Amino acid sequence: MLLLGIDIGTSSVKLAIVDSASQKTIITAQYPEEESAIQALKPGWAEQSPEMWWEHTQHAFAICKKKGVFNPLDISAIGIAYQMHGLVLVDKEQQLLRNSIIWCDSRAVALGNEAFDELGHEYCLSHLLNSPGNFTASKLAWVKQNEPEVYAKIHKIMLPGDFIAMKLSSSITTSISALSEGIFWDFKTDTISASLMDHYGFDPEMIPEIRPVFSEHGTVSLSAAELLGLKSGIPVAYKSGDQPNNALSLNVLEPGEIAATAGTSGVIYGLSDQLAYDPQSRVNTFAHVNYTPEQKRLGTLLCINGTGSMNRWTKNLLTSGISYAEMNETAKKVAIGADGLRVLPFGNGAERMLNNRLIGGHFHNIDFNLHTNAHIFRGVQEGIAFAFRYGLDIMCSNGLRPNVIRCGKANLFLSELFLEAFVNSTGVPVELYENDGSIGAALGAGIGAKIYARPAEAFSRMKPIQFTEPSLTSNYEQIYQDWLINLEAKITQQ
């Protein structure tokens, strides 16, 4: 039996076809090859069209089919991963009401901060495990306040993956994990937070039916089957936000296990069985894919908005057609520390780990007579690695004790320079795996469709392809402390 995994990313849609018996990936594809556009109608805003995601899904699947290496009619289940925290709104006819306000949009920060104060910090942190911030609930509050004509037509609110599942099946569902990432879930009562719903004046009927992450979230409709060339009636058996899904794809399911990724954004995601929270809500705790009220599995998530997005911005600005691999090789020619160049990679919206500050991206100590493109390439990747170190220190102050971090060999972790900077600035070894979000979503579908008896069975053949230990920590520590002085000065100015 074959499994289809769909990963709705900010930059592109990725697909994977996986053989359930061997757990081998038959084919992968992504569309588009260049990064999808983000619409920024005002500073700090970020929107994308959900219909664009659906069109890109169709294109990516067509690319897979064109290779002729599998029979689409052999696909038995579908899993979906998606960019977290995006708000999607549809009416009773399942028609979109507006573009999605996506994860890095900052327009709702003030509303979230107001809710944090009025609901009470102790309530929000102990019950929701987060402040409302600019998460999905606060984005919905912004629509209610600023676009009342749109709000009045809302039938259901969704996250990006829910929209793709709806297009496949005409069904609209959610999960505890999804509701927790929107800051709708009360972990003390294990119900939707009545206090938050009342504060914002939300109608509970807007919330879709709640189902487990690993379960049927609808079956492929006849119209979708004809459009894609699939069998009708096969289940959409798994839906998860991209970071819990990335952890799943790396077999991170039990307390103490840790995953990281460095795509458009950068994330460290550590598992716990405790209802823990950061007193300043700089890192966030959500229900993991295998969370149940009886067996709590929670993922504490550190997010850096501008990691791969800054690397991409640098490439587009300073190069003409060279590949990321060539850019990485150029950067390696410069010594550790980039001859004094320090980069703060915070130019992609309000940073949660900086208490929702918008400090922007910054280059420090540029010397016109010394620094070249190679210095900038290296300085950017080191600055991103140092941002990970800063966030990991916050997580460790809240009880995380990392022994190893599991990562997919993708995005920035394809760069030997970045991997070296990450391992030596954090001081934590890294295991790399040949896996990605679309493969994880496919395996998640196998779990949800009960093709695998238990989650661990879906990863029984997975082995690390590379293990990297710290060896230059003293070299990087001095440079990190210098970088930190620049960051703290910028924070003080806010």
Image (cartoon, rainbow, N blue to C red):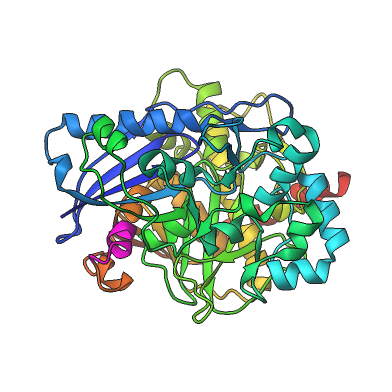
Percent position (x, y) of residue 114? 85, 52
Q: Residue at x 45, y 44 (%)?
A: 412
Q: Nearer the viewer, residue 207 or 105?
A: 207
| Residue, far front | 92
Q: Nearer the viewer, residue 144 or 387?
A: 144
Residue 473 seen in this snapshot: no
Q: Give the tally of numbered discs.
A: 0
Q: Nearer the viewer, residue 457 or 393?
A: 457
Location of residue 197 with respect to 232 vertically, above or below: below
Inspect the magenta stretch and tell me whether residue 447 lies in it: yes
Inspect the magenta stretch and tell me whether residue 435 lies in it: no
Percent position (x, y) of residue 322? 40, 24
Q: Which residues are magenta?
A: 443-451
Q: Nearer the viewer, residue 429 or 131?
A: 131
Q: Is residue 59 left or right of residue 129?
A: left
The secondary structure making up most of the magenta span is helix
Q: Quadrant of the C terminus?
A: top right
Q: Quadrant of the N terminus?
A: bottom left
Q: Quadrant of residue 64?
A: top left
Percent position (x, y) of residue 171? 43, 47
Q: Residue at x 73, y 51 (%)?
A: 202
Q: Is residue 267 left or right of residue 247?
A: right
Percent position (x, y) of residue 364? 72, 37
Q: Residue at x 27, y 34 (%)?
A: 61
